[in-house]
């Protein structure tokens, strides 16, 4: 199926901002991380995978950068520049080159303890996973023009908790190592904030409107104050290798670049109940899966096939590819999370 056809199906799938089976968690008390998650809109879950396994993923990600044969050497800082790296977003997020379907990405998504987090959260074993990117951020890059980009990944027209994002962290990530900034408590104020008309900030890195991201809103600096005045707190999430962080997609957040010595290694993983998806969305997801195309952070809707070619100096990157270097193993778990196989 051609990219254009897949995009046409995608446009037709943008049906509505409501979902058929929104879960109300207001009366739940669990006695574990879920209580904190529902209170603050975010939670860190420790030791989801072992430090050894986390190291395995770091090595895989480094090898992935080297597979492009652009001269990147993890031990030679002079090669930590754009010309030696595949094209990324905000200095380290990779969505193109079939990266969202690399074997290592699917291995991380189907880690039993990762699936368990989302099963507990949504109280179902029938889940879908996003075909989301990875993040490899090299510290002290001199060739980057970086600025904070506080945003949320839920359209203001969607009400309630419709998606939850997460990331599996592979490398030590302390205060100087960049990483996830979260406006703790902001998910609960989402409807109040958007009750009045709000203009999205026209950030220099914002995707052009014709790309129709749908579930992305960029905040102004003054909006941070609005949330802080209502008791929210902007926090940097520090993590150890193997930790996982979850956040409600209504939460204001962004990722900082590392300033210390440590390379940041992360796989984004988002899961939602399969019953949230329409048949059309599942069909589209299947097409994306079979064609190694990425999606947004949303597992069950807004299945927007990531078909844009990475641009290098205004031209399509010569290393552009549409398939992963290492194809995923098509296990039962992978096929179910991809929405391809029935539960
Ligand atoms: Fe985001």
Image: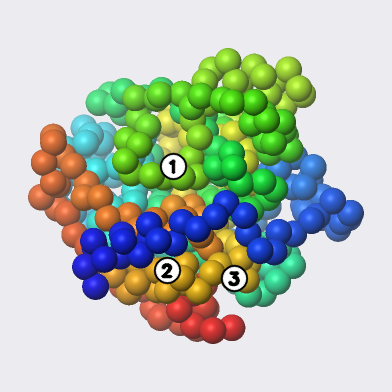
Above-or-below relation of 204 to 101: above
Q: Is residue 30 visible?
A: yes
Residue at 34% of width from left, 48% of height from top?
A: 94
Q: Looking at the picture, how far across and down is residue 211, in whole percent?
A: 33, 44
**Ligand 1 neighbours mark 3 (CB distance < 8 Å):** no
Separation (CA) of disc 3 from disc 2: 12 Å
Camera-near label (1 vs 2) is: 2
Taking 251 as reference, is 72 left or right?
left
For mark 2, does the 10 Å Cα neighbourhood hold few (<14), some (14 to 19), or many (20 or more) residues?
many
For mark 3, does the 10 Å Cα neighbourhood hold few (<14), some (14 to 19), or many (20 or more) residues?
many
Residue at the disc numbered 3: 274
User: Is label 1 in contact with label 2 (beta carbons under 8 Å)?
Assistant: no
Q: Is residue 184 visible?
A: no
Residue at the disc numbered 1: 264
Query: Element under label 1?
Result: strand
Where is residue 140, by image quadrant?
A: top left
Residue at 60% of width from left, 62% of height from top?
A: 272
Query: Element under label 3?
Result: helix
Quadrant, the N terminus: bottom left
**Ligand 1 neighbours mark 2 (CB distance < 8 Å):** no
Camera-near label (1 vs 3) is: 3
Which label's residue is closer to the chain start, 3 or 2? 3
Which label's residue is closer to the chain start, 1 or 2? 1
Q: Looking at the picture, how far across and down is residue 56, in whole percent?
A: 43, 61
Residue at the disc numbered 2: 285
Which label's residue is closer to the chain start, 1 or 3? 1
Q: Looking at the picture, how far across and down is residue 339, in whole percent?
A: 49, 74
Above-or-below relation of 68 to 122: above
């Amino acid at each position: 199926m051609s990219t254009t056809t897949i995009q046409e199906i995608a446009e037709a799938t943008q049906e509505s901002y409501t979902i058929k089976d929104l879960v109300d968690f207001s009366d739940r008390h669990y006695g574990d991380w879920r209580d904190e998650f529902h209170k603050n809109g975010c939670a860190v879950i420790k030791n989801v995978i072992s430090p050894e396994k986390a190291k395995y993923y770091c090595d895989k990600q480094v090898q992935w950068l080297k597979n492009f044969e652009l001269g990147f050497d993890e031990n030679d800082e002079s090669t930590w520049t754009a010309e030696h790296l595949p094209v990324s977003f905000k200095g380290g997020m990779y969505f193109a080159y079939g990266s969202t379907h690399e074997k290592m990405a699917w291995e991380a998504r189907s880690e039993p303890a990762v699936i368990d987090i989302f099963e507990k959260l949504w109280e179902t074993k029938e889940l879908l996973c996003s075909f989301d990117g990875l993040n490899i951020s090299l510290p002290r890059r001199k060739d980057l023009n970086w600025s904070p980009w506080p945003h949320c990944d839920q359209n203001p027209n969607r009400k309630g908790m419709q998606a939850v994002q997460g990331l599996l962290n592979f490398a030590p990530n302390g205060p100087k190592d960049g990483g996830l900034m979260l406006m703790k408590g902001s998910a609960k104020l989402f409807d109040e904030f958007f009750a009045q008309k709000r203009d999205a900030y026209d950030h220099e890195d914002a995707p052009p409107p014709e790309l129709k991201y749908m579930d992305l809103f960029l905040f102004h600096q003054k909006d941070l104050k609005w949330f802080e005045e209502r008791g929210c707190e902007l926090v940097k999430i520090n993590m150890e290798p193997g930790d996982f962080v979850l956040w409600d997609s209504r939460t204001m957040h962004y990722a900082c670049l590392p300033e210390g010595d440590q390379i940041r290694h992360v796989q984004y993983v988002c899961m939602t109940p399969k019953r949230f998806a329409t048949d059309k969305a599942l069909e589209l997801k299947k097409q994306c899966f079979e064609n190694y195309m990425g999606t947004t952070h949303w597992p069950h809707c807004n299945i927007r096939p990531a078909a844009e070619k990475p641009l290098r100096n205004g031209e399509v990157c010569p290393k552009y590819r549409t398939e992963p270097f290492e194809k995923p193993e098509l296990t039962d778990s992978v096929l179910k999370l991809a929405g391809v196989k029935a539960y």
